Image (cartoon, rainbow, N blue to C red):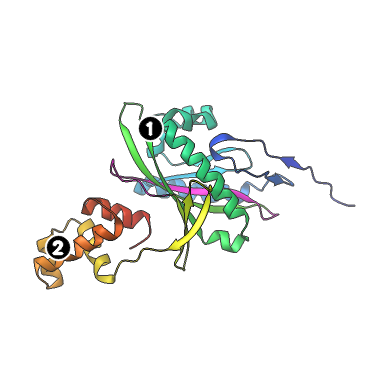
Amino acid sequence: MQLMLTLIKMTPFDFHTPPYDLFFEEEPDYNIIRQKVEILDTITKMNGQNVCIIDFYKNNYFYISPNHIFNCGYSLTKIKEMGQKFPELIIYEEDMEKESITKDAMCAFFATKNIKSQEKMTYFSSHRLKHKNGNILTILNQYKPFLFDSAGKMWMTIGISTLSTKNHFVESFIEVEGTNERFIFNPQKKDFNQIHKINLSSKEQQILILASQGYTSKEIAATQEVSLNTIKFHKQNILLKLNAQNISEAILYAYSHNLF
């Protein structure tokens, strides 16, 4: 007997809605992910990593790590109750609009690729959050397709967030793992254009790694057996390449753009 499937059309869901119609021929198998999330919960509790999983089938967050920076002081119960209204509460209005537009474009870009290609892609962005206590937080985000349904539709994406400096914003872009391909979001055309990826020399990478570990320029010079002026020269080149105001911003930029 022929199996009859119910066609379910997804309704718009604001902050995380792709600009095209998502169709799921049947409910995805949630048993596939539950065990994975149990492991993820243990890991995030151990290292304090800020992780969320967005569910395109149920139009909501499937998972938010305990004490996620995105919580902004609100309980997980409150976040789940508010659903898609929660981002409107904590994200700056102008940043909310920018994120919504770029994520729509990101989803559309991903949809043009096959599963193997999508699995190699990561989307990067940054925006400001309004904490419950009144503080303003700038965060860097990375999103990657995580699971697909049986028909190959993007079902869930996994996101990781980190704190940034108050002036450090990254342009929204997509990178392809194992290649030099980078696609920067074009606000006028509302799509992604391919550009050349910024590359740091091995020496520049090493200096940034040591700086991120708390080594001073003098200490880095000693470990590299070069003069202090040489280290200062390399640092200046790094700042120019990354358009950063100081070495702290350069470290964050390099981390958020996978330059290490």
Task: Find the magenta span and give its range.
Answer: 150-171
Reply above or below: 178 against 148: below
The residue to which callout 2 is attached is 232
Residue at the image point whose x is 47% and y is 33% from the top: 87
Reply above or below: 16 against 230: above
Residue 141 among those drawn in magenta: no
Residue 169 among those drawn in magenta: yes
Alpha carbon of mark 2 to alpha carbon of mark 1: how far? 38 Å
Residue at the image point whose x is 20% and y is 65% from the top: 234
Say what secondary structure mark 1 lies in: loop
Tell me the kind of residue under disc 2: Lys
Residue at the image point whose x is 55% and y is 53% from the top: 146
Reply above or below: 56 against 152: above
Residue most extreme to the right: 1
Q: Is residue 201 left or right of residue 224?
A: right
Q: Residues within 10 Å of mark 1 (few under 14, many from 20)?
A: many
* Quadrant showing the C terminus: bottom left
Residue 29 seen in the figure: yes
Tell me the kind of residue under disc 1: Cys
- Quarter holding residue 66: top left
Q: Give how far across and how far down residue 100 sits, in percent.
A: 51, 39
- Quarter holding residue 133: top left
The label nearer to you, 2 versus 1, is: 2
Q: Give how far across and how far down residue 187 sits, in percent.
A: 48, 46
The residue to which callout 1 is attached is 72
Sequence order check: which comes first, mark 2 or mark 1? Answer: 1
